[in-house]
Amino acid sequence: MDQRKSPFNLIGKNIIVTGASSGIGRQCAISCSMMGANVILFGRNPDRLNDTLNCMDNISNHLVYSVDLREYNKVEELIKEIVFQKGKMHGLVNCAGISNTLPLKMITPDKMDDFFHNNVLGSINITKFVTKQSSFSEEGGSVIFISSVMGTVGESGKTLYGLTKGALIAASKSIAIELANKKIRVNCISPGVVETPLSQKAVYSQNEESLTKIKNYHPLGLGQTDDVANACVFLLSDASKWITGINLFVDGGYSAR
Ligand SMILES: NC(=O)c1ccc[n+]([C@@H]2O[C@H](COP(=O)([O-])OP(=O)(O)OC[C@H]3O[C@@H](n4cnc5c(N)ncnc54)[C@H](OP(=O)(O)O)[C@@H]3O)[C@@H](O)[C@H]2O)c1
């Protein structure tokens, strides 16, 4: 089938992917390029951002920005520059994030602050600037927040991580309602455990017994980055044009238990 006739194609769409220097965000950038998008890659580590770029189709169509999303004003300036260079945006994937396992008794105000800035405020801030009338296509488009199953279900030591991921699910529903009149759809994806540098550093990956326990929570086994990236492609494409305000579990059956 001619890719142009498929509602799943992203041909000519300008799509920003945050967290594109690693893991799920990296695969998301690669998969969007395979579907024809012009991708704007955000991350902090410039070398790893370039590694991602080198794996993408049509390398010259994409832009790379090394920036910490907590530099809120700088992000606003960059969005203006990107729109000047590429035209208005059609999509944003908020993938940047950090994780940890921390018992309640170890949580401090500083740690809460750090998690909120990295996992919530950075994403809400860039979403605000990308979806402005001056930045986003009049044809509409799609914003995705990568949440986690931990935003809905509980696990020991996941209070801090889960509360930031739950915040994204809650926020995305109100943003979906607010932006519907601009034809901007807003959805969350909640992955289970996906094999990435983030999950490989996690406490449960450090010993065989905990890892087996985590694997057993996933009837289809642990996820791969393309499992989440393919869901992003769907929610970015016109094939999902009647879907907004949802939280899509991509979790190998974790939440079915
Ligand atoms: N892997 C899983 O099992 C899993 C499960 C559920 C949800 N998730 C979520 O999926 C997303 C991606 O996870 P991953 O496993 O792919 O993690 P990863 O491999 O550690 O990648 C995280 C990415 O986020 C970027 N990042 C973090 N804080 C940032 C900041 N302040 N400013 C700019 N970029 C920042 C990192 O940039 P640099 O490396 O350049 O600093 C990196 O590109 C996260 O939101 C995570 O919570 C992951």
Image (cartoon, rainbow, N blue to C red):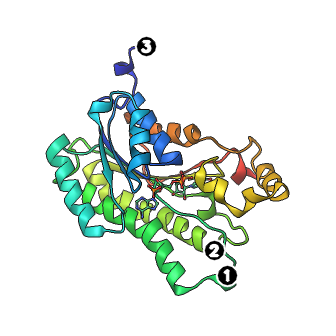
Between marks 1 and 2, how big is the CA–CA gap?
A: 7 Å
Which residue is at the front of the view, 237 or 183?
Answer: 237
Q: Earlier in the sequence, mark 3 or mark 1?
A: 3
Mark 1 touches mark 2? (CB < 8 Å): yes
- Tell me the kind of residue under disc 2: Thr
Mark 1 Cα-neighbour bin, 10 Å: few <14, some 14–19, many ≥20? few
As helix, strand or loop, the secondary structure at mark 3 comes to loop
Which one is nearer the viewer's eye here, 211 or 139?
211
The N terminus, quarter of image: top left
Q: Is residue 256 left or right of residue 46?
A: right
Which residue has dot 1 on it? Answer: 104
Callout 3 amino acid: Met
Q: CA distance from mark 3 to mark 2?
A: 47 Å
Q: Which residue is labeled 2 in the image?
A: 159
Mark 3 burial class by Cα count in 10 Å: few <14, some 14-19, many 20+: few
* Badge 3 or badge 2: first in the primary sequence: 3
